[in-house]
Amino acid sequence: MTDHGLIPSELQELSRRAAAAKDVSYSPYSNFRVGCALLCEDGSWVIGANIENASYPVTICAERTALVKAVTEGKKRFKAIGVSTDISPPASPCGMCRQFIREFADNSVPIFMYGRKEGECIVKTLGELLPMSFGPEDLHPDRGARK
């Protein structure tokens, strides 16, 4: 696993916070807990968990929960994203979440995906998970994705 510029303590904390976020998951229908941790460029952390709903389409994924929290706190620049599940191999963000992440992150942001087994992790950049993506700069060339 490459560190993508993160120091060992940041890597360890990303894993710990993503796993801990699963504890606040509300997933009574699927029992599929997902936790997400965002390492913001200012060094702060934001977590999120999946929140299910009896009307399945209105369920919100952990990644979107964390990003919505971050953005409403004024945080729009991220150094890394961690996603933790209880399955092996680890699960990646869904397509909707990949596009949602792209709104606030460029293609170089690493996404660390943690599985059930201790130390189990797959890391891919957003660009690897969402090739040929469409972002804010495509609508507003003067804006850029990470402002």
Image (tube, rainbow, N blue to C red):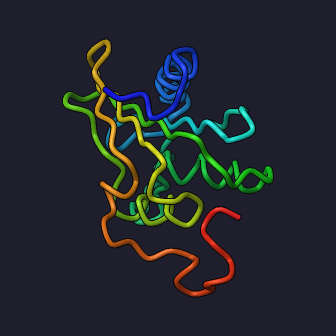
Q: Which of the two residues, 27 or 66, is positioned nearer the viewer here?
A: 66
122 to the left or right of 134 = left
Q: Quick check: 112 left or right of 147?
A: left
Residue 129 in picture, x, y percent from top left: 31, 55
Furthest residue to the left? 89
Q: Between residue 75 and residue 41, name the one nearer to us.
A: 41
Q: Residue at x 58, y 39 (%)?
A: 38
Instruction: Reply above or below: 14 against 27.
Output: above
Residue 87 picture quarter: top left
Position of the C terminus by quadrant: bottom right
- Residue 38, above or below 133: above
Q: Residue at x 66, y 51 (%)?
A: 77
User: Could you tell me which quadrant the N terminus lies in?
Assistant: top left
Work out whether 35 lies above or below 103: above
Residue drawn where x is 50% and y is 29% of the image: 18
129 with respect to 17 (left or right): left
Percent x, y for residue 117? 26, 16
Find residue 29 and report its horizontal and vertical position in percent.
35, 44
Number of labels in the image equals: 0
Q: Is residue 114 left or right of residue 24?
A: left
Q: Position of residue 94 (x, y in %)?
A: 34, 56
Residue sitting farthest toward the front: 5
